[in-house]
Every structure is written in C-alpha cells, then in structure tokens.
Image (cartoon, grey):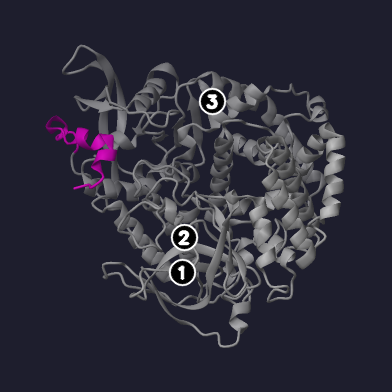
Amino acid sequence: MDPLSSINPYVSLKESPRLGDVYQKLPARSTRFLRYKGREQSPDSSERLLAFEFETRDVVDMKSQYSALSYTWGHPVLENFKDDLSHAVICCGQRMPIGLNLNDALQHIYVEADVAPPLLWVDAICINQSNLTERAEQVALMTSIYLNAANVVVWLGKDDKDAHEAHELLSEYTPALKQIATELVLGNPEGEVRAGMVNLYDDAKLHEKYHLRPKTMDTWKALVRFLSRRWFSRIWIVQEMIFNRSHLMCCGPLRFSWNDLDIFVSLVFGAQWHGLSFRGLEQETIKIARVFTFHREIRMSYTESSSNDPRFHLLTNEEKVYDYAQSYLLSSAFLEATDPRDRVFALTAFVNSYAAKLDVKPIWLKADYTLQATEVMLRTAQVLLWKTRSLDMLSYVTDLSSREQSDLPSWMPHFHIPGAVASVESLLDMHQGRKYHAGRLSSATPTFSDIYLHVKSPGQELKSKGYLLDTVDEVVHFESGFLSTLEICLRLPPRYINGQPPVEVLWRTLIAGRTDTAFPAPAETANDFADFVKAGLIGISIEALRSGNRESLLRLFTILGDIQGRCPHFSIPAVDEFNTILNSVFSDLDGCIEMLTKLRDNCPYRTMTSPTHWGQKGKAVFRSRKGFLGLAPHSTQAGDEVWLLKGASLFHILRGVNAESAHKILLGEGYVHGFMEGEALRLDGMSYSPVIIK
C-alpha cells in the first residue's frame, strides 16, 4: 500500500473495478502509448469525449515514433487548486477521469491545434498509478521514454493576458538579444558572458540601436508572472527537458522556445530583476533565476565533469558520483514535487547516467512507493554520508525554531518538506563559500570525515569525531538592531587571537570573512563597511528624532564614545565627527535623503551581509567564552557548543540533549572568525574526541 496515496489523485480512480481490465500487466521495458480514435459517446452519459486506445510497445523499439507530454498535474497557475477530476476521456472503451489541466492539454493537441502525434505518452493515463510495482518500474523507465520520444510536447496551460504580453516581449527582444550576445563574444573572445550584462529595460541607446520599443513595468511584471507558471518549477521536467532536446512548448495557441527563454533569463536577469522593483513578485523573480540556472548547470554536468569545489578533481570516480548526487539533491530542493519521494526518484536517472559515464555502478535507492517519505530521505542521506564521507549535508538542516516535529534525527535535512532545505541557504553556497576549510589545512586537499551511522538504533545517531572549540556566551540577532551589533566590539579582547582589532573582527564576521570575489576579504572592504555604518547611524538618528526617542539617540552616542575610547577604527565615526555629519544632514534634509538612498542602494557591504539574513530566521552573531566571534543558527543560545567535526569545511553548533547524556542535537552550521582556514588544527592540545549527534 502507498502510504502517500492521498496526495496522488489518480490512485483511487485507477482502483475502480471497471478499469481493472484496461491495465494489463506490462512486459519488461514496455509501456503503454495512447492512440487517438476521435470522439465517442461516454458509456455512462450523453457527453462525447476524446477516445483513445492503448498500444503496449517496447520503448526502445518505438524510438522517434511517439511524443511524450510534459505538464503539471495541478492547475498551471494556481498553487492551492483542488482538482475534482471531473473531466474525462474514453480509454479502451471505459470512461477515465482526468484533471483539468490534462484535459486542456489533450483538447489542444487533438482538437484545437495541428499537433496530434500518432502516439502519445502521458504519465497519468499510461501508468496504472494504483499499482505500486508498475509505478516504480515505469518511473525507472522514464529516462528511456523521454530519450526515445520524437519530441516532448510541453503544455504550460491555457493562454491569458500575461502569456500574450510575455510572448510579444520575447518575440521582439530575443532576436536582438542574440545579436547582442554574439557581438559581446566577438568583441571579447576571452571574456565571460555573464548574467545581467544586458539592460533591455531602460537603456535608451540599446533600444535605439536595435530598434526596440521600451516596455512598461506592467509588461515586465506580466513576463515574471508567466515564467512563474507551475510547470517551470516541477522537478520532473528537468529530465524531461534534458533527455530530449526537441520541445514544442504550448501555452494555448502561443508557442515558446526553451532555448530562447534560457538565453533571455541568463543574459537579462541581473539588469532587470535586481534593477527593477517588482513589488509583490520578489520571490518569483528569485525562483525564475534559480530554475533556469539549475537546468543550465545540470545540462552542463550531464555532458562534462564539473564542480566548484576545488577538491573535486582529487576525488575518485565513485566519490565524484556521490558528490554529484548530493549536489543535485541539495540544489534542486526549491523545485516542486507532488510526491516528496520524487525528490530522490527523479534524481535516479541523472545519477545512473553520470555513473555510467565514469564507469561506476552506484548504490542508489530504487523507486519504491511503499516507503514513507521520511524513510526514503533517511536512506538517501545515509548513503550520501557513507559514500561522500563529507559533512556538507549537515549545513542544510532547518533552524530549530522552524523545524517540523518528526522522528528524523537532528542531522538530517528535511528534503521531504517543501521549501525546508531551499530556505536554508548555507554559507557553502555563497560566493567563495567553497574556500572554507576549517577542518583541513588546505581547501584543495580532501580530508574525509569519520562518520559512523547507527542505522538500526531508534535515534539513527551519527557518530563522528570532533573538537570542542568553545561554548557560546552571547547571541545577538540582527533584528535586535544595528546598535546591538556594534556593541559587540566592546566585549571583544583588544586584540583578537589573530591580532586583529575588535571592529575589524566584527566587519569581517558580518560578511562571513569573504566578499563576492575574494576569501579572505581584502582590507579595503573596510571602506565599504564605513559607508554601511554611516548609512545605518544616520537612519537610526533620523528615526529617533522623528519619533522623539531620546533614549535611542543617547545610546547611539554612548556606543560611539565607548568604541572611540576602547577600540577606535576609522570605519566607526567618533562622536564629534558624527555630530558634524548630523549637522550637515539637517541643513539639507532633501540632500541627506538622496545621499542615504545612494548609500543604501550602492553599498557593496550591504549586499555582502545578505547571506547572514538568508533563509528561515537567518544567522545570528555569537561571542564565545574565550572571546571568539562568529555566525550561528538563529536558535543558538548561551551554553550551546561550537564544534569542529573532523574534515568539516565549517563549524557546527551542537546542544546537549540533557545533563545526563553525552548525545547532542545539531542546530546547524557555524562560522568562527579566525578559524576558517584550519587554524584550530594548530592549537596547543587540539585533539578529536567522539561525538554522537541524535
């Protein structure tokens, strides 16, 4: 029995006795195809329905003789649409209920347009969803089904105003964009064509040169809404699009090209999405970029070995396969799946293909819909930890305050919960994030972790070796205010363990020690921090004066005075200097607001600090008992422990289960300033001891 049968609307329908004779047992390597017979009267009503017959064939024998349909089971646009499956077709003489979107797709293919392939493969109809054995076998066969199809017919849903506006914009702008991209490459053959290089929104010279008409903000928003249709973010479409490059993309009568969409998003993304204010659509724009970037990266990795980890080329072929599998599982977490188990099962085709290329026979969980989602995820995580011997996966656990109650161990990311892993945004995913090597002397040298999985124990414990660096003494959350963050300087030693002054330790910690282009961050980044501080202090002062909050203003000047007296730094203005700044501000308030806006909008440091605010609850700043400063999960409390697990790239924050137990629970990853390049390994008396994480 399928424990998640309630989420698959077709399961109960296929259990109907009258459909029992329709689904005969399939021979090995075979599937059912639909052959259209025209319209026929329903056997139990007066309605005339599209009629089909099944033809069972070996998939390989049918190469290029059929089309495969790619669509979404639910509504093409609405997220929480409840489909009552009130539509139907006739299949082998029996009335078969289908969903709204599938009905629209079949009506378009066979009635409204001239698509009509001789044979069509549709998962909801061609697979007996109530037969778990068949379902698993057909999922394993899907790579071959899409690979051997003549083409993939993509159904994005019926057309609407947004679709027409998007189609008009893309039809006009894409040819010019291709010409621009060609000129960029020819003009600088050695240069990189980067995302956001082309500003098609408000560059008047560009519009004039290529005879383009500027589009309104409403049209750009229509494009965002169109690219946010649910089909684009389905996890199964990745293999549907990659294993077959011949696509017919339909949105009602409109036709789109995946390659054109990919070119448009990749080249225009930065200039448009980040340069424009899509109020109410901010999350959609981020997701659009991630979808197309993910497809692009998977397509590249499918054809060549690639990784942004400097250790990758030192791995064995087997280790590369599991590194690839883990990377895919983590980076695809934002994609949607009706069945959460498909987050693993949809990955199978890529793992097997990549492994075959490297002549490796992988151990991987086969599709089995009798398993609970948590069991599928746990088995997969255990295989990846065992085979990669890497603790990177631990960086993707959800913050404790947002973690759903379950029987899963604390070290296990909640892949099965929509959005849980995608919301985490690990420090490893930042620019330069793969250069951290807290548990290794070099970022380019693989040092594997000692991992022992107690798979048969009730708690599914993970046993490793680690070093307790220190205990958390103080936690400051960013939402408590900018002044609280600055105050931490006053509680740091005059010289940090690496000799740096307190303010430098703070500004480096807030950006996790790196910029978008360098790790460690260059010294001149302090100038950007100075602009960041100036904007923050002016904003606090204006708000305090506007609201009559004298206590806030007094606190600001007290902190500035204390920093000036104990740990002065050019990036933090002295009291007299800031008084001068405020006097100039109030003498030209309009000019001040303009200056403040520019400081906030054009301050690189603000962009660099955004990772500490990413994800569910973001990160918090902590100070340890020995005076170390770092970043930790939002739920970190005084008394929690900062551990360096053997071979780990980052630190991990652990909490004791209780006073009597040596077992720990994992809160998440951590950054400790001055210890991210293996410095802890050189400390006197440093040695690893066993640690068990429940």
Marks 2 & 1, CB-CB < 8 Å contact: yes
Q: Can residue 645 be seen in this view?
A: yes
Q: Where is residue 557 in the image (x, y as percent from the top left)?
A: 75, 52
Which mark is first along the chain, 1 or 2? 2
Q: Position of residue 101 (x, y in %)?
A: 38, 26
Task: Return the residue at label 2.
Answer: 326
Q: Is residue 513 visible?
A: no
Crowding at mark 2 (Cα within 10 Å: few <14, some 14-19, many 20+): many
Q: Where is residue 109 in the image (x, y as percent from the top left)?
A: 41, 23
Residue type at mark 2: give it.
Gln
Which element is circle 1 on? helix
Residue type at mark 1: give it.
Thr
Which element is circle 2 on? helix
Q: Mark 3 against mark 1, which lies toward the viewer? A: 1
Crowding at mark 3 (Cα within 10 Å: few <14, some 14-19, many 20+): few
Task: Return the residue at label 1.
Answer: 388
Residue type at mark 3: give it.
Arg
Q: Which of 379 and 438 is in front in this view?
A: 438
The residue positioned 57% from the left and 32% from the top of the image is 281
Look at the image and say whether residue 673 sits in the magenta stretch. no
Q: Position of residue 215 (x, y in %)?
A: 69, 23
The span from disc 3 to disc 1 (Cα, nearest Å) is 43 Å
Q: In which quarter of the image is residue 44?
A: top left
Q: Which of 619 and 516 is in front in this view?
A: 619
Magenta segment range? 1-23
Which mark is first along the chain, 3 or 2? 3
Which element is circle 3 on? strand
The span from disc 2 to disc 1 (Cα, nearest Å) is 8 Å
